Image (cartoon, helix red, strand yellow):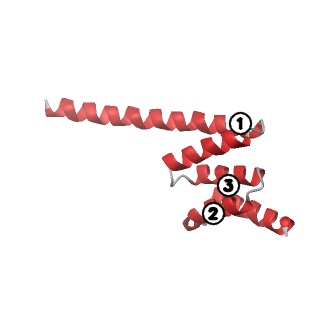
Amino acid sequence: MKKTLKFSLILAATILFFTSSEVNAQSLKEAHRLLENESYTNALLMYNALVKEEPTNMKFGYFLSHAYLHVGELDSAKKVMEKYANNGSDPYYMLGTAAIAFRDKIWR
């Protein structure tokens, strides 16, 4: 009985994990589509929701910062990237900070 219960809990947790990951992947694709179609407000809402759901996911943080740059919100983009400053070697962090530095230099 205990083995069956333990197995059921592990199976349920595994299914929940993969379903959540799949939903996030679909949401990320949808947010990208919105950004490409210049629906910036909706894209920002979706990226913010993804970051809120997985605050340690640097990829989501990068794309949120990227969306802020699209609408000219340099300070907001900087704030997002500052939250991930401990991920200094992450490629998304390096790409995001480089984009911000480039835009910051141009806008001065």
Q: What residue would you read off at disc 2?
A: 79
Between residue 38 and residue 20, name the one nearer to us: 38
> Is disc 1 placed on a helix, strand or loop?
helix
Q: Can residue 50 be seen in this view?
A: yes
Which corner quadrant holds the C terminus? bottom right
The residue wearing badge 1 is 34
Tell me, for residue 65, which label it has, or none: 3
**Which quadrant holds residue 69?**
bottom right
**Which amino acid is tagged 1?**
Leu
Q: Does the CB distance between marks 1 and 2 fall below 8 Å? A: no
Within 10 Å of the Cα at label 1, are there few (<14), some (14-19), or many (20+) other Cα atoms? some
Q: Where is residue 91 in the image (x, y as percent from the top left)?
A: 65, 58
| Mark closest to the chain's N terminus, 1 or 2 | 1
- In the picture, the quarter occupied by the N terminus is top left
Q: In which quarter of the image is residue 26?
A: top right
Measuring from the top left, give residue 75's x and y in whole percent.
Answer: 70, 63
The residue under the point 71% across, 49% down is 67
Question: Given the image, on which type of amino acid does mark 2 rest?
Answer: Lys
